[in-house]
Amino acid sequence: MELTHNHYTIAGAVDPLELVQKYGCPLYVYDTAIMEKQYRRMTDAVKVKRLRINYAAKALSNINILKFFQRLGAGLDTVSIQEVMLGLKAGFVPRDITFTPNCVGLDELLEAVRLGVRINIDNISILEQFGQARPDIPICIRINPHIMAGGNLKTSVGHIDSKFGISIHMMPMVHRVVEATGLRVEGIHMHTGSDILDPDVFVAGAEVLLKYASEFPDLDYVDFGSGFKVSYMPGDIETDMEELGEKMTARFNEFCREYGRDLELVFEPGKFLVSAAGFFFVKVNVIKYTTSTVFAGVDSGLNHLLRPMFYNAHHHITNVSNPEGKPRFYAIVGYICETDTFGVNRRIPEIREGDILCIHNAGAYGHVMSSNYNSRYRPAEVMIHAGKDYLIRREETMEDILRNQVEVDL
Ligand SMILES: *Cc1c(COP(=O)(O)O)cnc(C)c1O
């Protein structure tokens, strides 16, 4: 059987039910063909001399996925020193990794310098400290353009009261620190958050970034971050990458002419590259009726996929084992002792005990945000690549639960 989500198909040759049988349930499955397709959409859409797509590792950081993007020719965007180390282990050369942390100490930045990766600084206090410690290391500066974009306050990071980036109103101070310390600014960056629908909103943000970019004479790259929206249900709109690419191409080429040099245009998508490539399979343990609702209780919960509960994110849910059943309305809930609802009022082909459901768009911010809450295991991950399935993470065991616990005699 084939599983389709909008225009995507998973596992042409691989039956999801067989995968679940082979690897157990619950199970995360990623299809690299969808990732590659999304990557090529971006590289095809943006026609500038120097383009770099830095995959945002935090969306899905299994080392095999990082290796896959490295082979495609992507760079890597990292937000912790551990992600930097993972990226190096996956084969990225240091210069292809950008370190874009928020609220980390100078020590962690100096460690990143030691590892040779690009440094992106997002507050003036660290800019001063870094400039005194390592004025010889070129840096990138993350600005906050103050545009409110994105789905909600949890995913929007470019608004005026966001903790991310240096306010554009503070740019005179940035210049003073740069001059006083002798730092060289090689890059300028913004990342305004997730789920920007309208290419024009993105381009408006880009315009703000370019305005400040022209104040720095030694730039090598301009990093426009990410925030591209993906489609979360049939008929949902996603960022029109082709239109956005066309508009950014025109504007950036014009900017480079004015600037007098071909700068590198950088994007750092996470969700856009991997969200639709991920499928999370869960098994129905219980069908439960209340006076108002039919619940399907599954063998997973907020410990495995947090987005529906944390962001109120909508994830499309399908019944893989009874696709032709008569549709009814269900609430899909987890087994954690909290309210952990994957979806309510979902019209789904009849769900029976033992059925396998698929939760879609599970590639980005799925497994990476999982936990051991309720002392449960994090699930296995499988990668489909060139028609073959590979186990890329085993399900945890009791050993993992106990690994760092230190038992003392009372
Ligand atoms: C999380 C993050 C991204 C990726 O965001 P998506 O919405 O997944 O594309 C890019 N850049 C930075 C700095 C981030 O923190």
Image: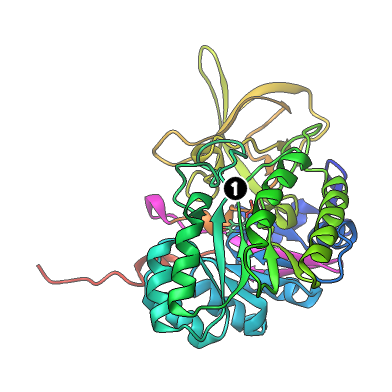
Position in image of residue 171 (x %, y %):
51, 57
Can residue 229 be seen at all in this image of the molecule? no
Number of residues whose C-alpha sits closer than 10 Å to that of mark 1, classed few (under 14), some (14–19) or many (20 or more): many
Q: Is 11 left, or right, of 173 in this rendering?
A: right
Q: In this rendering, is residue 34 above or below 97?
A: above
Residue lying at 80% horizontally and 65% vertically, measured from the top left: 256
Label 1 near ligand 1 (CB < 8 Å): yes
Position in image of residue 230 (x %, y %):
73, 44
Q: Quadrant of residue 329?
A: top right
**The stretch drawn in magenta includes residue 374:** yes
Q: Nearer the viewer, residue 194 or 280?
A: 194
Residue lying at 84% horizontally and 58% vertically, measured from the top left: 254
Residue lying at 77% horizontally and 52% vertically, measured from the top left: 16
Q: Quadrant of residue 62?
A: bottom right
- Tell me the residue that label 1 is attached to: 193
The amino acid at mark 1 is Gly
Colour treatment of the image: rainbow
Residue lying at 49% horizontally and 69% vertically, measured from the top left: 80
Q: Nearer the viewer, residue 211 or 392?
A: 211
Q: Nearer the viewer, residue 17 or 384?
A: 384
Can residue 342 be seen at all in this image of the molecule? yes
Q: In this rendering, is residue 115 above or below 23?
A: below
Q: Nearer the viewer, residue 183 or 77?
A: 183
Position in image of residue 364 (x %, y %):
64, 53
In the rendered structure, which segment of residues is drawn in magenta? 372-393
